[in-house]
Image (tube, rainbow, N blue to C red):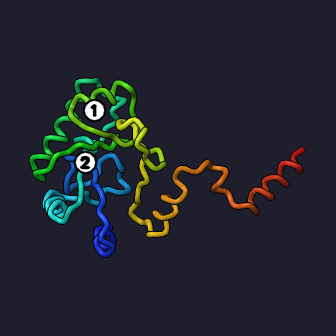
Amino acid sequence: AVPILDRRDWKATFFLVSGDMGGPGRWLGDEYSSLLLMDWSTARVLVRSGYGFGSHTVTHRSLLDIPTEEVNDELLRSKERIEDELGVTVDDLAYPFGITTASIMDSVRATGYRSALTTAVALAEPTMNPFFLPRVAIQGRDQLWDFAFRLRWANRPLDQLVVRPRLKIASSAKKIRR
């Protein structure tokens, strides 16, 4: 992704699982065990190139499944490690698996973050809760048109995403069932 971003002079924010840097993402399972996450030296190069970094916790465990003290530890240790390793301020968090609660959002705020992202797909707006922000993610195999499509349609109701011929087919199917 970085060469494509660089060619267009675009920047991005990478969310790091600080305890797994350079190793496999343990939460991804055996199928992806050969894929290694970004290492610290690569992250340092990207910092110098103007890319941003946020936290994705230390271990990527679901924050719903652990006690508050461990939630706070995951949040704070990840933030501090990334700041120490990269020499940047970490203000942003991406929740593991994109899920959170009011209590977890309180912990995120208390540990010094300024915003946090869920996996809800939409464009963020200034009036939104900064600790419950949606995002438009890019996946490893995405092409530029995939991302452009997501940006264009991110805040549209689902029924606007369906093409007209499909609606006609669906309408016909309803008549047949009756």
Q: Which of 39 and 92 is in front in this view?
A: 92
Disc 2 marks which amino acid?
Gly
Q: Taking 177 as reference, is 7 left or right?
A: left
Q: Can residue 160 be seen in this view?
A: yes
Near mark 2 (Cα within 10 A), the count class, few <14, some 14-19 or many ≥20, is: many
Indicate the secondary structure of the residue bearing disc 1.
helix
Q: Earlier in the sequence, mark 2 or mark 1?
A: 2
Instruction: Give the residue at the far front of this rendering.
Output: 126
Disc 1 marks which amino acid?
Val
Name the residue beneath numbered marker 1.
108
Q: Which of 116 and 78 is in front in this view?
A: 116
Q: Which of 129 and 163 is in front in this view?
A: 129
Task: Determine which quarter of the picture holds residue 112.
Answer: top left
Indicate the secondary structure of the residue bearing disc 2.
strand
Q: Residue at x 23, y 28 (%)?
A: 110
Q: Where is residue 164? Give x, y as percent.
A: 74, 61
Question: Is 169 situated above or below 19?
Answer: below
Q: Which mark is residue 54?
A: 2
Q: Where is residue 7? Give x, y as percent.
A: 31, 75
Q: Taking 163 as reference, is 145 left or right?
A: left
Q: Residue at x 39, y 33 (%)?
A: 100
Q: Taking 36 as reference, is 100 left or right?
A: right
